[in-house]
Image: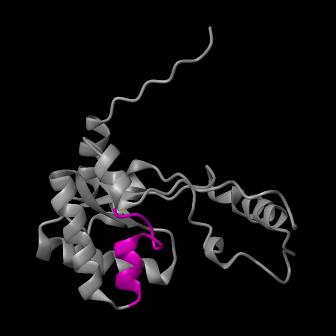
Amino acid sequence: QKGQQQIPKFLIDRAGLDQYGKDWIILSGGLKGEVPYKLLMDDEEEAITTAKWFQSRFKDNYYFELQDNGLPEQDHVNQALYALGEKLGIPVVATCDAHYLTPDQADAHEIFQCIENGRNLDFDRPKSLTPKEFYVKDPALMHARFERFTGACANTLKIADQCDLQFKFKD
């Protein structure tokens, strides 16, 4: 096996969402999320069916997630999600898919990804992280990037206000 062992991703199916999802706030996810991916594949009918399932299950706690990461397909999906949200009454939320803190850390992150996946930096560059936009963006930049999507930044704050997460560290 090349590189380090992969950390499994947490996945939950609809039965699990029904069983454990009470009071959860659900976002549609990034480009590989169910609805965004269907829109990316030009399958609007299935995207609508899926979005309606989430909307019926989570009511006002379901949001279409918009990201600005420099990928051309992301802009296409953001526009499609926004239009679909207007059509179905599903609000949008601005998020930042952050893998590192500042843009100057992008190359180090790419090298880490190559090591982790047993790839060569010169020949097998991870295409998904090429834009150097996967850093923590400040509020002013987020507002500027999402101003064309009415309500997206306000909904980010609305969700943050609904969350009560507390960490307990050893004394």
Magenta residues (range): 28-41
Quarter occupied by the N terminus:
bottom right
Residue at 25% across / 41% down in the picture?
Answer: 23
Which picture quadrant has residue 128?
bottom right
What scheme was used to colour the molecule?
one colour
Residue at 42% across / 79% down in the picture?
Answer: 37
For residue 129: magenta?
Answer: no
Given residues 2 and 91, the one toward you in this image is 2
Q: Pinpoint residue 10: horizontal percent, then vertical percent.
A: 54, 53
Q: Pinpoint residue 156: horizontal percent, then vertical percent.
A: 30, 50
Q: Pinpoint residue 123: horizontal percent, then vertical percent.
A: 84, 84
Given residues 99 and 118, the one toward you in this image is 118
Given residues 2 and 155, the one toward you in this image is 2
Q: Seen in the image, is 22 located left or right of residue 68?
A: left
Quarter occupied by the C terminus:
top right
Which picture quadrant has residue 74?
bottom left
Marks counted in the figure total 0
Relative height, residue 37 to residue 147 (above, below)? below
Q: Tell which residue pokes out farthest to the bottom in this image.
A: 42
Residue at 27% across / 65% down in the picture?
Answer: 147
Q: Tell which residue pokes out farthest to the top in this image.
A: 171
Q: From where the camera sits, is residue 91 visible? A: no
Relative height, residue 102 to residue 22 (above, below)? below
Relative height, residue 133 to residue 21 (above, below)? below
Q: Pinpoint residue 146: horizontal percent, then vertical percent.
A: 32, 64
